Image: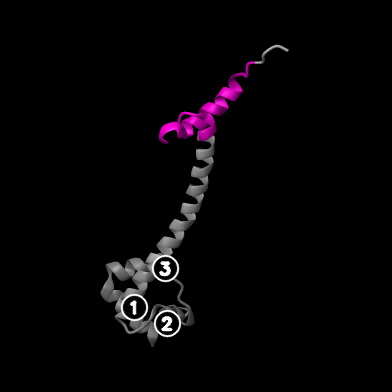
Amino acid sequence: MTRVKRGFIARRRRNKILTFASGFQGSHSKQFRVAKQQKKRALISAERDRMKRKRDFRRLWIARINAAVRFSGLSYSQFVYCMYKNRLSQNRKNLAQIATLCTPFFSTFSQKIMT
């Protein structure tokens, strides 16, 4: 049988993966087989860490709200319950920003919610 040279499609596929891995170190960016494995791992890690970043920011916002609410004599869970009871809905990101930037307003706000 005659030798079949793979055309530009296979080369384009390999170059696409090697271009993706161009910032990796050593053979991870030079050899196709290793670069393919590293690309797979990189994409898995990227997706996992995007989800982790959402969790981390939520934890940070809750910690900031909790620290600000403690000055009013409440805990975070009591504060959220009072907000729910008074039918006030505000996301944690905004509450954390208010708690850090406008501390006096947030303390009066939490006092009003308690009553």
Which region shows up in magenta? 5-34
Identified at 49% across, 56% down, the residue is 51
Q: Which residue is mark 1?
A: 69
x%, y% of residue 71?
Answer: 29, 80
**Marks 2/3: CA distance?**
15 Å
Q: Is residue 94 above or below residue 107?
A: above
x%, y% of residue 7?
Answer: 61, 18
In the image, is 56 to the left or to the right of 100?
right
Is residue 54 one of those drawn in magenta?
Answer: no
Q: Which residue is mark 2?
A: 78
Q: As shown in the figure, which amino acid type bears the numbered disc 1?
A: Val
**Marks 1/3: CA distance?**
13 Å
Labels 2 & 3 near each other (Cβ < 8 A):
no
Identified at 45% across, 62% down, the residue is 55
x%, y% of residue 103?
Answer: 27, 73
Identified at 50% across, 53% down, the residue is 48
Quarter the C terminus occupies: bottom left
Q: Which residue is mark 3?
A: 92
Q: Is residue 77 above or below residue 99?
A: below
Quarter of the image for residue 80 reads bottom left
Quarter of the image for residue 59 reads bottom left
Give the main secondary structure, helix, strand or loop, of the magenta stretch.
Answer: helix
Q: Residue furthest right?
A: 1
Labels 2 & 1 near each other (Cβ < 8 A):
yes
Identified at 39% across, 82% down, the residue is 113
